[in-house]
């Protein structure tokens, strides 16, 4: 049976068939459209629920997370070599950068701190993996941004039941979550049951970083791949329309 690719979208508003455009690009490279399953959870993210939580006793935890995450974005930009600072946003204050990523960060926080949202999203992820397992012998997972965290969390628990040949994280915030102690370096069931982990990142992407240094595991191969998506911090987060990303995904499907 052929491989099946499972797409997991990031923060933002997505329609159910958001991955169809990417499939068109993969079809051009592969000569045939691959079997695919899309994890859709955009309808589960409810900003009003998070706002209610921030008014509660533990609301400070959410606000502190957002502030600390924004500080990491600012620090990562400032640590870039000058020749990589293509955009004026890299020298603007933390507050500006926080506003620039505020919408995505709110949805990330909702997933991380609201157990109801977390559980509902994870149910969608597990259902998609089970569906993919019934369609093929091997699975390729492509998780973008928050979707990379959703897939990571699921695989840490359930990878033992899956035959995942390649796990892609695209523009992943996992490095920042690890540095903030929101996630640990423990890969759970991932090392023994996934062939390879490819982390695609652009240094101008405010969410993304290399992951290898923060998720060491000798029996497992995690490969960081720099992808020159864009020079603008917002557009540089759009990996699914990038030719290099498509080429990496297509190669994994062979």
Image: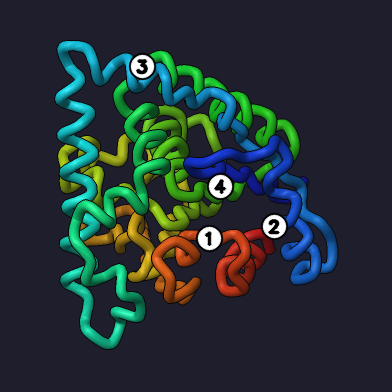
Q: Which label's residue is closer to the chain start, 4 or 1?
A: 4
Instruction: Using the image, determine if residue 109 lies above or below residue 217.
Output: above
Q: Which label's residue is closer to the chain start, 1 or 2?
A: 2
Characterize the local packing of mark 4: few (<14), some (14-19) or many (20 or more) Cα atoms within 10 angstroms: many
Q: Nearer the viewer, residue 186 or 91?
A: 91
Instruction: Using the image, determine if residue 139 lies above or below residue 161.
Output: below
Mark identifier at residue 141: 4
Report, in whole angstroms, how far the alpha carbon at label 3 lies from the one at label 1: 28 Å
Q: Which label's residue is closer to the chain start, 2 or 3?
A: 2
Mark identifier at residue 115: 3
Q: Is residue 65 left or right of residue 104?
A: left
Task: Indicate the quadrant containing the C terminus: top left, top right, bottom left or bottom right.
Answer: bottom right
Report, in whole angstroms, how far the alpha carbon at label 4 lies from the one at label 3: 24 Å
Residue 116 screen position, x and y as percent = 41, 14
- Find disc 2 in the rendering and name its residue: 22
Characterize the local packing of mark 3: few (<14), some (14-19) or many (20 or more) Cα atoms within 10 angstroms: few
Q: Quadrant of residue 14?
A: top right
Q: Is residue 51 left or right of residue 41?
A: left
Mark identifier at residue 238: 1
């Amino acid at each position: 049976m052929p491989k099946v690719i499972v797409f997991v979208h990031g923060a933002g508003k997505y329609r159910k068939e958001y991955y169809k455009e990417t499939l068109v690009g993969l079809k051009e490279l592969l000569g045939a459209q691959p079997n695919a399953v899309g994890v859709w959870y955009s309808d589960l993210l409810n900003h009003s629920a998070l706002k209610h939580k921030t008014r509660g006793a533990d609301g400070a935890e959410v606000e502190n997370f957002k502030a600390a995450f924004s500080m990491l974005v600012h620090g990562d930009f400032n640590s870039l070599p000058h020749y990589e600072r293509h955009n004026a946003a890299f020298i603007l204050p933390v507050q500006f950068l926080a506003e620039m990523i505020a919408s995505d960060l709110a949805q990330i926080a909702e997933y991380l701190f609201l157990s109801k949202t977390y559980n509902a999203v994870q149910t969608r992820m597990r259902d998609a993996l089970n569906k993919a397992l019934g369609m093929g012998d091997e699975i390729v997972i492509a998780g973008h941004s928050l979707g990379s965290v959703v897939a990571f969390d699921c695989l840490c628990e359930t990878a033992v039941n899956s035959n995942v040949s390649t796990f892609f994280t695209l523009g992943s915030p996992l490095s920042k979550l690890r540095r903030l102690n929101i996630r640990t370096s423990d890969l759970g069931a991932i090392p023994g049951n996934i062939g390879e982990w490819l982390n695609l990142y652009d240094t101008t992407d405010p969410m993304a970083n290399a992951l290898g240094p923060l998720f060491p595991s000798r029996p497992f191969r995690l490969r960081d791949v720099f992808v020159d998506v864009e020079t603008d911090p917002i557009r540089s987060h759009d990996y699914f329309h990038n030719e290099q990303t498509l080429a990496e995904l297509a190669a994994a499907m062979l």
